[in-house]
Image (cartoon, rainbow, N blue to C red):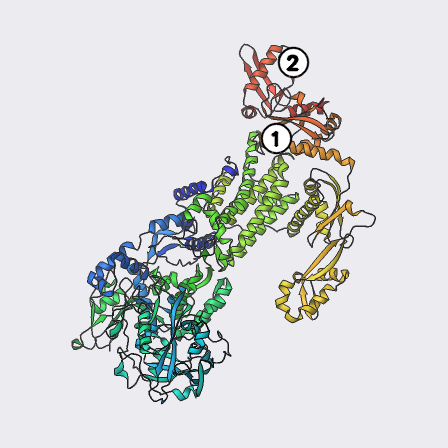
Amino acid sequence: MEEICEGKEYSFPRQEEKVLKLWEELNAFHTQLKRTEGMPEYIFYDGPPFATGLPHYGHILAGTIKDIVTRFQSATGHHVTRRFGWDCHGLPVEFEIDMKLNIKTKQDVLDLGIANYNDECRSIVMRYSKEWEKTVTRMGRWIDFQNDYKTLDPEFMESVWWVFKQLHLKGLVYKGLKVMPYSTGCKTELSNFEAGLNYKDVSDPAVMVSFPLLDEVDGASMVAWTTTPWTLPSNLCLCVNANLTYAKVRQRATGMVLIVAESRLSQLPTIKTKVETSTKVKGDVANSGAPKDKSAPKHKGAVNKGENDKSPPPVDTTSYEVIGQYKGSDLVGKKYKPLFDYFSALSNVAFKVVADDYVTDDSGTGVVHCAPAFGEDDYRVCLLNNIIQKGPNLPNPVDSDGHFTEEVTDFKGRYVKEADKDIISVIKAMGRLVNSGSIMHSYPFCWRSDTPLLYKVVPSWYVAVEQIKDKLVNNNKKTYWVPDSVKEKRFHNWLENARDWSVSRSRFWGTPLPIWISDDGEEIIVIGSIQELEELSGFKATDLHRQHIDHVTIPSKRGPKFGVLKRVEDVFDCWFESGSMPYGYIHYPFENQELFERNFPGHFVAEGLDQTRGWFYTLMVLATALFDKPAFQNLICNGLVLAEDGKKMSKRLKNYPPPTDIIDEYGADALRLYLINSPVVKGEPLRFKKEGVFAVVRDVFLPWYNAYRFLVQNVLRLEVEGLAPFRPMDFSTLQKSTNALDRWINSASQSLVFFVRQEMEAYRLYTVVPFLLKFVDNLTNVYVRFNRKRLKGRTGEDDSRIALSTLYYVLLTTCKAMAPFTPFFTENMYQNLRRAMPNSDESVHYCSFPDVEGQTDSRMEQSVSRMMTVIDLARNIRERHNKPLKSPLREMVVVHPDVNFLDDITGQLGEYVREELNVRGIVPCNDPLKYASLRAEPDYSSLGKRLGKAMGLVAKEVKSMTQTQIMDFERAGKAKFAGHELELQDIKVIREFKAPDGVNKEDIDASGDGDVLVVLDLRPDESLLEAGFAREIVNRVQKLRKKAGLEPTDSVEVYYDVLDGVVGSDSSVLQQVFTGQASYMAEAVGGPVLQQQHLPAHAVVLAAEQYKGVAGGSFKITLARPSLSFAQDLLHEICSGNPAHAENLKVVLLSRDPTNLRSELSSNKKVKVVIDGQGEYELEAGKHFHFSVGDHLLQASCRS
C-alpha cells in the first residue's frame, strides 16, 4: 500500500477529481455494463428534465437517489442500462422563444412561419446539456450521455403516436369542448394536474352585484357574489340551490329590495342611516361583506363546506328589514334584467334563474352567476337548462391571449384581469353594485409563464381517464412507494378524483397529434407509425414535427369527391410524451419488443413530490390504459429542497449556496450523504444548510479516513521494521480469532452488510447513513482505539497481523457495501487496499455487493455496545465528582441481569474497560435490587394516542407495579394492564441508585441508562497513587509526541531524567514511579522509558521538555529517533582489541540508513562490513550492534 496524508491535509474534492480521471481511463461505467451483460435486467426509468435550465439541488437529489439504487442493483447481479433523457418539447421551450422573439399572439408565430419558429425552439433545447453532463458526472452519477434519448427524436415521437393510437382503438380518445385551466402567457390550455403545480396567495376583487327580477312589483333583485368581475359581461343565468331558504330584505337607508340565501344575510353590507353616520365613524362598507376564502379559487364565490359557521349571525336589523321568504325552487324560472346587453340575442333562453346542488350557503350569497365559457359548473348548468347548445357557437368573448373580443364592445382588446376595475366602475355607475371589496385566496398560476390562469372553454382532445379510474386505483395498490404515505394518501386521492385528460395543445413545438380528419368531420384516421402514414398518404416522413407533416393529406376512403383528410393542428401536451417514456426511449413496439415485454412494469423510478400530479400520474395513466398494469414496481418520492430560511430557493434572492461551490469545498460524496440522510428522502422538505454538509465530512468521512490511515501506517511499519510485506490473512482464519474485539468488529461489519442490503432492497436509503455513522464511530473509537497496541505490533508480530488483517477486511467490506452511496471515497480507499490483494478487481464498482459471511456474533455485539455504555456512565460519575481519568480507582460494580454480559465485561472485555476507565477491579452483579430500586412509568407519548381514555387507568396500574412485578415483566417482555397488553417499549423501567448499607454516600456513586447500572467506589487508595502518577507521565509523553509533529506510527525512544535540586520538588517519589511503573509506561508508550544517561551522543533528538508538579517532583522527557547501540566489548574483540578499528566500524554502521541496513541482513541476522586498509568483518545484529538502545538494554538485562 502507498503512504497517505493526514486527514487535515486530505482534500476530498481534489481526490474525487482524481477518481474521475481513473474512471475515464478505465472507461469504468461502460466496462461495468459490459461485465454485467447477460445478468437479469433491472429496468430504471429516468424522468427527462429540460436542458433549457441549469441543474439545481432538486435534480442533484433525485439523481443521487437514482445513482445509489442503480449502483446497488449492479453490485447485486443485475444489468442496469442507464440512459440520460431530455424533455425537448412543450411550454418551457416555447415560452423562452416567445420571450426572445417578443411573440405575443398565435398570429405572430404564423407570420414568422412554423418552420422558423420550431427551428428556434430546436436551437435551445440542448442549451445547457454540457453543464448538465458536467454536474451530473461530477456528482459521481454513472449514466450514459452519449446514448441518450430525446423526446424530439423521430423514434421517440413514433412511439408516442403508437401509444395514442392504442388509446384510440380502445375507445379512450374523444374531442370535447370543456372549461379548462388556460394560460394566457403560453396561449394554451393546461391539464388539471398542471394547473395544480403553481398556486399563489393573491388578492382579488370580491363584489356583490344586483340582478333585478322582471316581474317583482317591489323591484326585488337577486344578489350574486363573485371574485372574477371579468366574467360578468358573459353572464347568461343565475343559479340557486332549490333546497335552500332565501330571504327578501329591504335596505332601510335606500329602500332597495334584495334576495339572498337566508343563512347569508349577515354578509350583506351594513348601510348606516344619516342619523347614525353623524354620531359614529363610518365603517369600511366595501370590505364588510367580503367573505373570507382560503380555499382553491372558485371564481363565482363557492367555497368548501364547513369553512364558515353553520349558524351565521342574523341580519343587521338597523340596516335591513326582512319582508319575505322563498324556497330556492320558488325562484327557478324567474327572469331578470341582464347586466350587459352583449348577448341580448339569447334573451329568449337566457337571463333566468336555474337551480343546481353545486350551489352552497357556505359563502357568498347563495346565488351564483353563470358564464358558461368560464366555469365548468357554469357550462354544465347552462347546457342542462338549454341556455346553450353543444357546438362551436358558445358565447366566449375572450380570445387566446386573454383579451376581450369585439362582442364586448366596452372593453374590446382589454386583458380581462386588467379590466376588472373598470367593469366594477361601470356596474357601480349602473347602480347595480351592492358591495365591493377584496379577498386573499390561493389562485393557480401557469407553471411556466407564472401568469394567472383563466378557466376558459376550449376545444381539446381528451383521454377518457375517468373510464379507467378504478383500474388506476387498483394498479396503484400493486406498487411499492417510499414513503408509503404519499402512495396511500396524496397519490391515491388524486387517482380517485382523476378527470379526463386534455392531451392536445394549440401550439407548435411538440409531437403533432396523429389525427387526420375530413372537412365534414365524418372520417377520422389516427396514425400509429411512420410506415402507416406512408402507406395511407404516400409520404415517407423522416421528421415528425409540424413543418414536415402539416402538408401531408390522406385520400378519403369514400372517394375523390369527399376530398382529403388533413391533420388537426394541435400537438401533444409534453406530459403525454413524458408519460410515454417507457415505450419511447427504446422505440417500442418497433424495436426491443422482447426487452420491454419481459421487463414491464419497470423496476424503479424516483422523482420529487410534485410529480405525484405530474410524471408519476401520466406514467400510471398510460400504462393502465395500454396494459392494465402500473408503469413501475418501486418508487422513491423525495420532498422539496428549500433554502435555509424555509423559503423556495431563489437565484434572485441568492438564499442558497450554488451546488458547484458546495462540491468544490466539501466534495460530492459529502453532499450525497447529506441529502440522503435527511427528511427529504421520506417525502418531507429539507432546509438546506451548508453546515450540514460539513458535518458529514467531520462526523463520517474524517473518522472513516483516520481508521483507514491507521491501517496504512501500520502496514507500512512492517516493511520499515524489515518484516515481511503485509498480505491479509484468509478471512475464514480471522473468524476464528480469540480476540473479543476482532470477533466483535467482524460481526459488526457483517451486520452492516446485512442491514444495508436489507434497507436497499426496501428502498429505505435514509436509514443507511445513521447506521454507517454508528459503525464508523465504533470502528475508530472502539476497535482502532482499544487495539492500538496490537495494530502497532506491541503484542507480537503474529497478533499484529491478525489485527491488521481484521481491520483490512472490515475496511474492504465497508468500501464495497458503501460504494453505491459514496462512490468517490470508497474508490479512492479501494485502490490502495487492493495493492495488498493481487488479482482484485480494478474498481470497487466492479465488485459484487458483499454477502454475509459466517455467523454474526449478536452476543458480542451487544456486550460491546453495553461496554461502551458502561464506559460512558463511569466517565459521567468521574466528571460529577471531579475525579480525572489519571486518578486510578479501586473498584467498579456493573449491575445487569444478563450473566453472559457480566462474563464478557469482566472477562475478555475487562482489560479494555479497566484501562479506559483506570479502575483496578470490575465486580459483576446480577441482582438488580442490590444497588437500585425499580419503578415503572408508562410511555405516554406512544400510548396516549393508542389507548385514549383508557390511558389513565393503564397508567395507574403500571405505576403501582412492585419491583418483583417489574422484573417479571422485563423477563416476559409483555403483560396486561387494565385489559390492554403492553410490551417492553411501552413502559420505562427507571433504576434509581441505592447505596449499600455501611457505605457513606460520598464514597460511592452510580449511573445508569435503564439497562445497565454502574457503581464506582470513589474512596482514595494510597496504593493506587503510583499508577496515577505513571498515567500522568504517559500523558506528558503523548503530548510531547504531538507537539513534535509525530505520527502515531513514528518510532521513537523515550528518555527521562528526574531532576534533583529543584526548589519545592521532591524527587524520591518520582524516581520510584519511573522504576515501579516501568512496565506499564513501556506498554503505554510503545517502548521502554530509558534513563537519560543512556542517550547516545549520536542520537537525533526530536523534542525535549521539562515538567514539574507530578508526584511532587520535576523531570525531563527527551524524544529521539531510535539509534544504533553497540556492544563495545564485542566490537573490540572482533577488531582484535584495536579501539581505533572498533570506532571505525561504528562510524561505518552509523553512516548507513537503518532501513537499508535491516534489508542487508542475511537470514542469520549478519551483515558484512569492509573497510579499506582495515579488513572485512561479519557483524551480527542483536549481538555486536542493536537497532535501538532499548533493545540493547533489554538483551543486556536478560543476560544478567
Where disc 1 sits, the SS reads helix
Where residue 435 sits: x, y (%)?
Answer: 39, 75
Total marks shown come to 2
| Label at residue 1040 | 1
Answer whether labels 1 and 2 touch (C-beta < 8 Å). Answer: no
Mark 1, Cα crowd under 10 Å, few <14 / some 14-19 / many 20+, is some
Q: Quadrant of the C terminus?
A: top right
Q: Amino acid at mark 1?
A: Leu
Residue farthest along the right direction in this orientation: 998
Indicate which disc residue 1133 carries.
2
Q: Nearer the viewer, residue 870 or 733?
A: 870
Image spot of residue 176 (x, y percent): 31, 75
Element marked by disc 2: helix
- Quarter of the figure with residue 88: bottom left
Q: Is residue 909 above or below residue 1090?
A: below
- Residue 968: quadrant of the picture: bottom right
Looking at the rendered structure, the kind of residue marked 2 is Glu
- Give the residue at x 36% y 71%: 501
Tell whether 1187 sits left or right of 921.
Answer: left
Q: CA distance from mark 1 to mark 2?
A: 40 Å
In the rendered view, tell whether residue 461 sits above or below residue 816.
below
Q: Please indicate whether residue 443 sits to the left or right of residue 698 in the image.
A: left
Residue at x 49% of width, y 37% of height: 9
